[in-house]
Image (cartoon, rainbow, N blue to C red):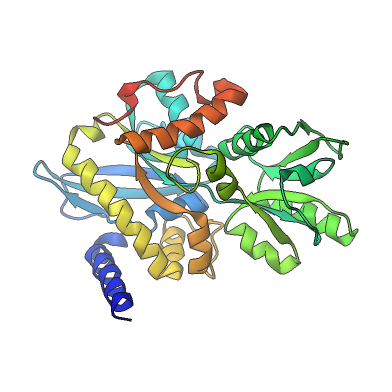
Amino acid sequence: MKKFFVAIMVVAILVSAVAFTACTPEDSIPNVDKTYTLVAPDGAPALAIADLITQIPTDKAVYGISRKVVSSSIISTEAIKSDVDMAIVPANLGARIFNSSGGYKILAVVTNGNLYMTSSISCEVNSLQDLKGQMVYSIGQSSVPDMIFKTLLTNAGIEYVVSEEAVAGKVAIKYYADGSEVISQLALAKSENKLAFGIYGEPAVTTSFTKGFEQVFDLQKLWAEIDESSQSGYAQAVLIARDSVCEDSEFVTKLLYALKANENSIMVDSAKAVANIKAIYPQSALQANVTMDVIERCNIKTVATNTSAGREYYENTLKAVMAINANLIGGKLPSDDFYLE
């Protein structure tokens, strides 16, 4: 009981230390020498900046952080706009941007996989082998999650094919734009008492359980079984910054600390975290009733990539992407210049 009380007090102190600046309006950050714009895609990755402080002082200057959330469908163009200094992007996109033009560094992995597979009706699934001959509806064609699933299948010796219908002996995959479309297809299969599977992310997964779907796989756990790093997931989204931002190493260090503080804060008050995102981006798909359990399943954890372990963790994901389609990361692993010294 005493240990529990101490743990709560530590979190409370950490949260209170950042609360006074976390909700400052984005266009009026007072008493700063320079403001950096940080953009993130809507959904689970946006939670990585939900309670992020908006002022970071260093010996050189006091920096303001202006948070911006956009639709995940346009993050690739938003991230490289001239007025954007930092961006949370899919892991492969970060590498592709650097390989294309340089000028950026990766600071950390901030989303470590939030994908799960559900079934339309109750079934017994003991391994990926049980998916042979079945239909899988999935989000994210040619994205990191797609590459992770295909790597898992390949590693298990299972053939897959993109198809409109099930194929004997193979896993048939049909792609949809987002989780809501996958859920609709599963609901249709359920209404016809047909077995089908869906791959999509939190928080949509937990919401869909009310429709009677059942979780059959946690893709993060499946990946951890074949990945040699010490992490419990894979690098789904990363934070990149322009080289000019990284010139103040003290700022970067304090920013990474602030991201870790955010992890604790969003777990203490999930409703507040969602409210903060909606204040920035009213169209957000995040719902006010998102619970702490769901946020935990979103896997928002900061893994700095300026360590050998952090870099290995990130590169393991890139290697999985490369094995299937190297063009998705710009044809090669990023050079040392992509990583902080």
The residue that appears at 50% across and 20% down in the rendered structure is 330
Instruction: Report the front residue among 296 and 71.
Output: 296
The residue that appears at 31% across and 23% down in the rendered structure is 337
In the rendering, at what x and y percent does residue 310 appear?
Answer: 36, 38
Q: Which of the 4 image quarters holds residue 154?
A: top right
In the rendering, at what x and y percent does residue 170 appear?
Answer: 81, 35
Q: Is residue 154 visible?
A: yes
Task: State whether residue 322 is above or below residue 286.
Answer: above
Q: Which of the 4 image quarters holds residue 158?
A: top right
Count of labels in the image: 0
Residue at the extreme left of the image, as rendered? 59
Decide if residue 127 is on the left or right side of residue 151: right
Task: State whether residue 146 is above or below residue 211.
Answer: above
Instruction: Report the front residue among 88 and 200.
Output: 200
Decide if residue 157 is on the left or right side of residue 35: right
Which quarter of the rendered picture does the N terminus lie within?
A: bottom left
The residue that appears at 26% across and 51% down in the rendered structure is 257
Q: Is residue 51 visible?
A: no
Decide if residue 46 is on the left or right side of residue 172: left
In the rendering, at what x and y percent does residue 215 appear?
Answer: 68, 58
Which quarter of the rendered picture does the C terminus lie within?
A: top left
In the rendering, at what x and y percent does residue 101 appear?
Answer: 39, 19
Task: State whether residue 109 is above or below residue 47.
Answer: above
